[in-house]
Image: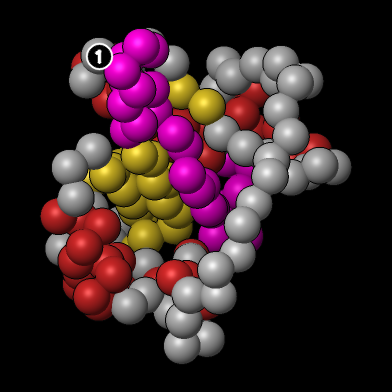
Amino acid sequence: MEIRRAATVGELTAAEYLFDRPVRPDWARRFLDAQGHHLYLAHEGEVPVGFISGVETVHPDKGTEMFLYELAVAEPFRRRGTGRALIRELAALAGERGCYGMWVGVDTGNDVALATYRSAGGKDDGTCTVVTWDFGRGSREGA
């Protein structure tokens, strides 16, 4: 397995089956061009088998932390360390970029995700509740 940072819209389109919805080229370009946005692809040969995305968030009194936005691994490649390797890649980048920490939100009852994050050194602090607002656009646009 090889992990490479995604640099082109074509790479993301080739890995489209790993995402929740079809890759929109304009959104993909915007993501790739944005400062502090990161996406790595895991490959077996030339086949993308997983990805991780992260976004650096900066606050005036806390500094910078990495938000692990999404992790996905194709079914046949799960339970082989792919997710753990992707998490470690993003964590290493966060450290290189001076982030003081990294975090991810996990759906209640998603024991598989929790096990993956723990295997990569993450700790569940048991204190998080996610509150959301849906503005009826963004990722749902055109769906």
Residue 51 vertical placement versus 97 (above, below): below
Residue 143 vertical placement versus 133 (above, below): below
For this rendering, which residue is in front, 3 or 29? Answer: 29
The residues colored magenta run 56-80
Residue 120 vertical placement versus 27 (above, below): above
Q: Which residue is mark 1?
A: 98
Q: Residue furthest right?
A: 109
Rendering quarter of residue 66: top left
Crowd band around label 1 with a 10 angstrom C-alpha radius: few (<14), some (14–19), many (20+): few
The residue positioned 17% from the left and 42% from the top of the image is 35
Majority SS type along the magenta span: strand
- Coordinates of residue 10 in the picture (x, y in percent): 20, 72
Residue 23 vertical placement versus 98 (above, below): below
The residue positioned 61% from the left and 29% from the top of the image is 117
The quarter of the picture where the N terminus appears is top left
**Amino acid type of the residue tagged 1 in the rendering:** Gly
